[in-house]
Image (cartoon, rainbow, N blue to C red):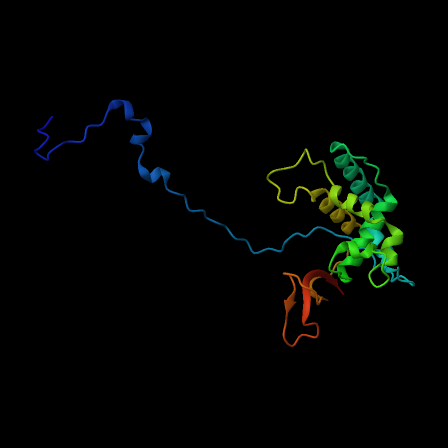
Amino acid sequence: LTDEDSGDEEKIVSADHWDEEDDIPLSVFQAVKKIYKWSDTDLSLPDIKWPTMYKVESQLPSATELFLRFFNEEVIYMFVFWSNNYATKKNLMGNITHEEMHAFIGTLLLSGYLHVPRRRMFWEQRKDKQNILVADALSRDRFEFIMQNLHCCDNDQLDPSDKFTKVRPLFDKRNKIFQEYVPYWEQHSVDESMIPYFGKHGCKQFIRGNPIRYSYKIWIPGDK
């Protein structure tokens, strides 16, 4: 003990705070440098049997047929089932049919390039506004009912750690379908492609001097 004003106080360590690890030298905790031994030899590659090249179809499928390959009945059923499930939980009549879901998706695709100030204009009675394709395929109230209840998963079983949890089932099914049609060839590469687009969207790019100046840029697989 010393006088508190002398400035010569000594540090007193209590035995209760002492641990056996305090007796271990710090050099023991230093990272050990890894030593690699290199050998000059050829890599052993697995024997992969690549399939023959796919034959080009004599008659290319239509745009509708191509779309239905990736939005097949399994995907449509998923939307119909979970949309009806969500509507029923809100005490609404969950009776959306497969035909209505097809018409709903078709209307969304049409509205992607045929812009109108208001969506309801597709169903107006005036000839300069009404769209016969949309009005004959699906009623306005039915379209809005599907829009308000559209789901592809159980809304009560969402993963909070997944930002895409509400559309994750759609991603999984689409990726599975893509693998069914992807060419399994020996020489494969990834390249970029430009999709022309002149509407308003944050993903649209402008590239000066490019044949397609206003467009989306996406990555596509390439082969020989």
Q: Residue at x 66, y 36 (%)?
A: 158
Q: Position of residue 99 (x, y in %)?
A: 88, 46
Q: Residue at x 73, y 51 (%)?
A: 47
Residue at the outermost top position? 16
Whether 214 is drawn above or below 101: the answer is below
Whether 207 is drawn above or below 146: the answer is below
Nearer to the camera, 128 or 216: 128
Q: Does the rendering let one see residue 151?
A: no
Q: Does the rendering let one see residue 52?
A: yes
Nearer to the camera, 152 or 172: 152
Image label count: 0
Q: Residue at x 65, y 64 (%)?
A: 204
Q: Position of residue 216 (x, y in %)?
A: 68, 64
Q: Residue at x 81, y 54 (%)?
A: 107
Q: Position of residue 198 (x, y in %)?
A: 70, 67
Quick check: 29 left or right of 155? left
Nearer to the camera, 2 or 89: 89
Quick check: 118 left or right of 37? right
- Examine the image and state in which quarter residue 19 appears: top left
